[in-house]
Image (cartoon, rainbow, N blue to C red):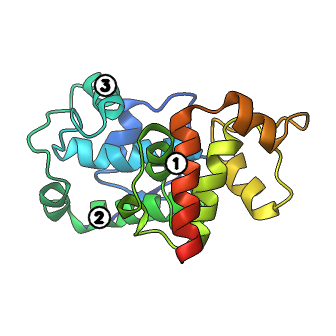
Amino acid sequence: MIVTQLSLQPPSELTSSDYISLMSHGVGDLSSYNVVELNRLRNGIFAQAGLDFSKTNPALYKLFSKFDWYKPTTSSGSVVYANLTPLQKKNVLALLNEEKKRCGGRLTLSDFYRVKVRQLSEDDLKKYNKEDLKILRNSLIARYGLTFNDAKLRKIYSNMPWYKPNPNITASEIIDKQMSDLERANIQTILRVEQKN
């Protein structure tokens, strides 16, 4: 069987055919896709293979439910992954690697979401290295528009749909006046773990 590679062109919103093509064609150039689209395409492979996102990621469940090919059968990602073809696994890996590259090297979009919406414990953060923790901690401030001197942080956050730099705002103004108690608590938890690493 000859496998062709697709040169995917990102539409303003991913279509059913964007997802379907990844089940039988190799991934081509991903440079024109944003990090959200990469994440959705990767999860779209799992969705087409039957992964039920209803409890783990309601936003993805809602997104994929509008497509007639979405027929969730299991909530086990490992079961779904085991049943993917070698080509589909290769596509998952290519999409994941590109997403991680844009998120700092080891992180994915879901890591940024998690630190924003959930009360973190030190146990939640054990899987991250010191650099990951720095990126995640600063992401909470970046969401409010802080402009960073650190070029690596600027590059990572520029890939995020929520990052809108505002040179007129300071970190102390964000932390003292704009952040939620949850976000401030998560910064402190991340800092504690960061200092232990």
Mark 1 or mark 2, whichever is nearer to me: 1
In 3D space, how far apart are the residues under numbered discs 3 and 1 (Cα atoms)?
28 Å
- In the rendered image, is residue 9 in sight? no
Q: Which residue is mark 2?
A: 89
Task: Indicate whether 69 appears above or below 114.
Answer: above
Q: Position of residue 194 (x, y in %)?
A: 57, 69
Q: Secondary structure at mark 2?
A: helix
Q: Separation of disc 1 and disc 2 at Cα?
A: 34 Å
Q: Nearer the viewer, residue 104 or 177?
A: 177
x, y percentage for residue 140?
62, 44
Residue pictured at 80% horizontal, 35% vertical: 173
**Foreground disc of the pair 3, 1:** 1
Circles 3 and 1, Cβ within 8 Å, touching? The answer is no
Q: Where residue 186 is drawn, which disc sits there?
A: 1
Quarter of the image where one finds residue 175: top right
Tag of residue 36: none
The tag earlier along the polypeptide, 3 or 1, is 3
How many C-alpha atoms fall within 10 Å of the one at disc 3: few (<14), some, or many (≥20)?
few
In the foreground, 56 or 195? 195
Residue at (52, 73) in percent of width and height: 129
Q: Nearer the viewer, mark 3 or mark 2?
A: 3
Near-viewer residue (168 or 84): 168
Left or right relative to 152: residue 15: left
Asked if marks 3 and 2 touch (Cβ < 8 Å), the reply is: no
Secondary element at image label 3: helix
From the image, tell me which residue sits under label 3: 62
Residue at the image point whose x is 31% and y is 25% from the top? 62
Q: Position of residue 121 (x, y in %)?
A: 39, 55
Q: Give neighbour class at mark 2: few <14, some 14-19, many 20+ (Cα, 10 Å).
A: some
N-terminal of the two: label 3 or label 2? 3
Above or below, 131 against 98 in this view is below
